[in-house]
Amino acid sequence: MLIDFENKIFEGSDGRKSLFDFQLPEQAKGVLIFMHGYKGYKDWGAWPLMQNYFVSQGYGFVKFNVTHNGGTVDNPIDFDDLEAFGRNTYSKELFDLLTIIDETERIVKEECELDLPLYLLGHSRGGGMVILGGSEHPKIKGIVSLAGISVIENRFPEGDPLREWERTGVIYVRNARTNQDMPHFYSFYEDFVHYKSLLNIESAATAINVPFLQIHGDMDLTVSISEGQKIAEWTDTDLVIMKGADHTFGSKQPWSEEDLPEDLEVVVHEIFTFLSNIS
């Protein structure tokens, strides 16, 4: 193994520190950078097993926690810092992704003296973010979105709820796993309005000029399969539909099994075939 570390610190948006993992096998064909979704983190569920699979198939794998997901360097799982979660924005997550892309490129080039293609893989919100971050990035040679979101704007309230949010300055979402009421400050919405053109997934998707893969479960109750269909239309690609698959492709937290969930195993094979055809 050329590189094998976990929980290395990086500095992302607003100078906040977070963690990333990086494994790079000998004779690697490229490096896959994975971005988690909303209320997620790099070690959620079966994501570590997904990393193991790709490394075993000859691909480097990077996964990271966005800086304002509520976790900390000391406790990256249980959302100790709800203030940071409340201050999170889509533009901050995009900044974090671009920071990790740059850091991955630097490590591969300077520490390993290699020139390897970089690929992006994102789940849910992360699936939309990798489209935004990779559509015209010169170092990205392929993008994969798993149950990715297609529109950001409709994830905010409208009308009276939006005005109430502005009046109070905060709304809360329940985290069923941790039993926390997690805040979103009104600055979340203000930031989106400010960076609206930058955060337009449709525009970014139509600008993609590298191979693209979109996978969606037809039993996804969190992000409708219609969003995957929109992305496939914008990218002029075929949508891979997983019959009977839910939003996380069978994974859950905690995941105590030694093997990938059946649906996620099919997904990683689809991604591997995709990468093999473009590597």
Image (cartoon, rainbow, N blue to C red):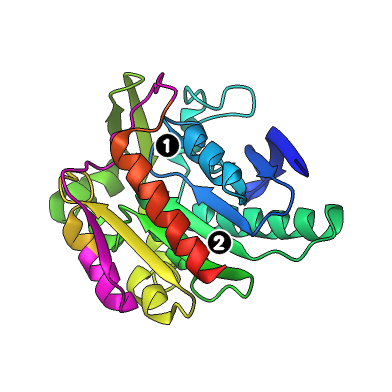
Counting every numbered tag in the picture gives 2
Residue at which label 1 appears = 40
Q: Residue at x 48, y 68 (%)?
A: 277
Residue at which label 2 appears = 119
Q: Position of residue 64 (x, y in %)?
A: 57, 42
138 vs 132, nearest the viewer: 138
Q: Position of residue 74 (x, y in %)?
A: 64, 22
Residue 156, which numbered label?
none
253 vs 271, nearest the viewer: 271
Q: Residue at x 48, y 73 (%)?
A: 135
Compared to 259, does 30 lie above or below? below
Instruction: Place residue 212 in its image quadrant.
Output: bottom left
15 vs 202, nearest the viewer: 202
Q: Residue at x 19, y 56 (%)?
A: 225
Q: Chief secondary structure of the magenta span?
A: loop
Q: Is residue 93 left or right of residue 244?
A: right
Instruction: Specify the amino acid type for callout 1.
Output: Gly
Q: Quadrant of the C terminus?
A: bottom right
- Please provide the residue range marked out in magenta: 229-258
**7 drawn magenta:** no
What element does badge 2 sit on? strand
